[in-house]
Image: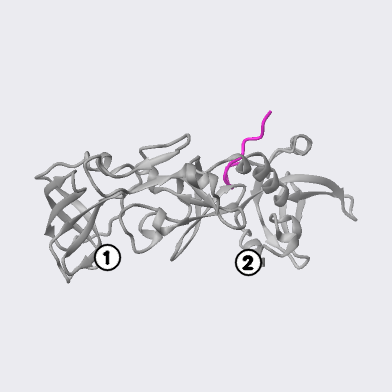
Amino acid sequence: MMQAFRTENNYRNASRLSAAELRAAMASREILQSTALAFDTQRQLRFELGGCRAVMPFGQCADGADTGSVRDIAILTRVGRPTCFVIEGIDTDENGQTVYRLSRAEAQRMCKAEYLDQLQPGDILPCIVTHIEPFGAFCDVGCGISALLPIDCMSVSRISSPADRVSVGQQILCAIKSRDAQERFVLTIRELLGTWAENAAAFTVGETVVGIVRSVEEYGTFIEIAPNLAGLAESCPDLRPGQAVSVYIKNILPEKMKIKLVIVNHALSQSHRFELRYFITEGHLDHWLYSTPESHKRIETDFSVMACNPA
């Protein structure tokens, strides 16, 4: 049966499998997972599988660990977390006890060769956010293999921090934007969050809704009312980016891709973050156009060009 590759923490838990089940998984090269219990003085991750000890030597803790391209901290932080692997072998220690030899690196190589290397720019795949930096979010795209979701690919409307859009541990959908010089994926999510028209269709002139301040300029205040949609209200220097406000929708202008807003409540008591609403959830995109047919401004993504000119 073809191996199904998933993000880490989504494989069968090996901790309580029987010896026979573990041997069968080893024979079939099934990817399993268990929580790493320690990183010991011999620089190996330790686990317990079916009541027996299991070890993962440093070089097997991640693809590239043996060449030094993976930092120690990336291995140390596996302790206490579900970690995927294949069982490479079964040994017996000096006391005659069974010891399983594990390899996360091999699971990652399998995932890369049989799954990730087959994908192209424009393909949509599930990810899990693993950590956030000011410039973007790193995501697990399979077996703990990391890819970057840059902040400017998180939405059409501008945000100050990736944390405005996603959180660590969140399961999200992304499209592959390109590959970098090291052949790692660069991801994007904005193309899945709807065009201007699709987002604007959820709103009506005359209603009052919650918005989030994204930038305050001399000529006005940009306020997001959906992850891929922002409008312009009057200038208000007392507001700050990230602040939640309520706004009255004064006008919706598809030909200019503009929404005119009036701020009703300048300071809502609670913080707010919009849930991601996907308009596309699977398959492949060759081209995506955010702009309306009437607008002279074109906001678009051509994935086919990126496929022909990676990195």
* Residue 267 appears left or right of 281: left
- Which percent across, then down, holds residue 73? 63, 66
Which label sits on residue 30?
A: none
Q: Quadrant of the N terminus?
A: top right
Q: Amino acid at mark 2?
A: Ile
Q: Quadrant of the C terminus?
A: bottom right
- Residue at point 66% right, 61% down? 75
- Cα distance in 3D space between marks 1 and 2: 33 Å
The image quadrant that residue 43 belongs to is: bottom right
- Which percent across, then down, holds residue 131? 50, 59
Q: Amino acid at mark 1?
A: Pro
**Nearer-N-terminus badge (1/2):** 2
**Residue that numbered label 1 is attached to:** 241
- Residue at point 33% right, 60% down? 159
As for residue 299 lying within the magenta part, the answer is: no
* Classed neighbour count for the residue bearing mark 1: other residues with Cα under 10 Å, few (<14), some (14–19), many (≥20): some
- Which percent across, then down, holds residue 117? 63, 43
